[in-house]
Image (cartoon, rainbow, N blue to C red):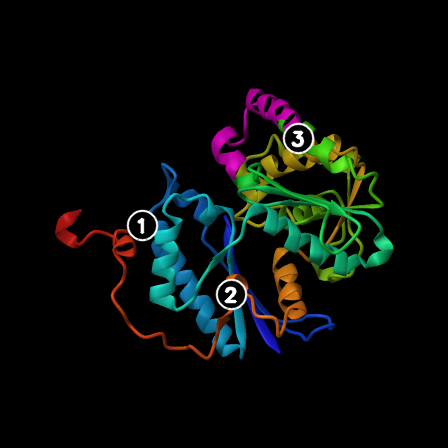
Amino acid sequence: MRLGVLDVGSNTVHLLVVDAHRGGHPNPMHSEKTQLRLAEHVEAGQLTAAGADGLVRAVARAKTAAINAGCEELLALATSAVRDAGNSAAVLARVRVETGVALQVLSGEDEARYTFLAVRRWYGWSAGRLLVLDIGGGSLELAAGLDEDPEVALSVPLGAGRLTRQRLTGDPPTRGDLDLLAADLDAALAPIARRLRQGGSYDLAVGTSKTFRSLARLAGAAPSSAGLRAPRMLTDVGLHQLFGFISRMASADLAGLDGVSPGRAHQLVAGAMVADAAMRALRVSELHICPWALREGAILHRLDTLGVPAPSQRPWPLNDRHPAARPRPRAAQELSPPAAGQR
């Protein structure tokens, strides 16, 4: 079957289309991103009208692309940027009415579980007990275990984008801000690390997400042109050396480095600090970098549950290509930009 997964994150709205079947390897057929930086459109805990407008447009484009790609189903997932907004219910209602796409908001723990499943399938049972770290824009997900469902799955609000906005406002950040954030990260991650270590030592520690891939590339890992299966590592020594370099650079200069996305360059320093603090707290000296993460985990879970309907996880069917027009609910109307004489 041809399956699409739409991931609405803090930075991007990413559509991935694959051909896959139960027990088979998902074969990527199409991928496209919209750089929305949704988390930067949250004010006083609410997603702004401009942010909601951008989300509706991005989801509508993704739906059209999924239809054009021949998808039979689209799994539409939203993570921390939507999850943390106080008006998320109204935003989701508006997206559903105007695009026909029902976004499913994942909890942080579910993010960690989907990602862990993807990493387990990538490395297989021979990897033993896995530790998985995923640095997103709004949160850090951590999971550990021997099986496909982790023994421990956690999410903490230590995303690279969130920390950049809240704690590293200089460009480049000041030494004082860096030192204060480093101390706070150590304090926040100490109890998390103790909980994850209760199950025993790790046979393989893995980092996944764009942040880890960028850091590994800057520390000398193979470029993306080497393919998904090229082994990539990030060591604590390499990360320390890299941090001494990037922490003194402005975001415009970071954007010119190989492997750094211009839209994420401004949060690279915070991402490196989270990676360093997590590796130190968990006593990990090296991370294997996995190319699979949340989207692939969602696809694998869907394939595993074919024929087992679950109302809370049922995907949006693409045969409903033209949802009937109906009045928008009051909450959704309030998200619309004011009319010309009301501004």
Residue 115 x/y as whole percent: 66, 53
Residue 282 x/y as whole percent: 75, 34
Q: CA distance from mark 3 to mark 2?
A: 35 Å
Q: Amino acid at mark 2?
A: Pro
Crowd class of label 2 (few under 14; some 14 to 19; many from 20; radius 10 Å): few
Q: What segment carries the magenta color? A: 162-187
**Along the viewing direction, whichever of 305 and 69 lies nearer the viewer:** 305
Mark count: 3
Checking the image for residue 49, the label placed there is: 1
Ranked by sequence position, the earlier of labels 3 and 1 is 1
Ranked by sequence position, the earlier of labels 3 and 2 is 3
Q: Are marks 3 and 2 in contact (CB under 8 Å)?
A: no
Residue 310 x/y as whole percent: 55, 66
Is 297 left or right of 279, judged from the image as shown?
left
Residue appearing at x 60%, y 76% in the figure: 2
**Residue 49 in view in this figure:** yes
Q: Are marks 3 and 1 in contact (CB under 8 Å)?
A: no
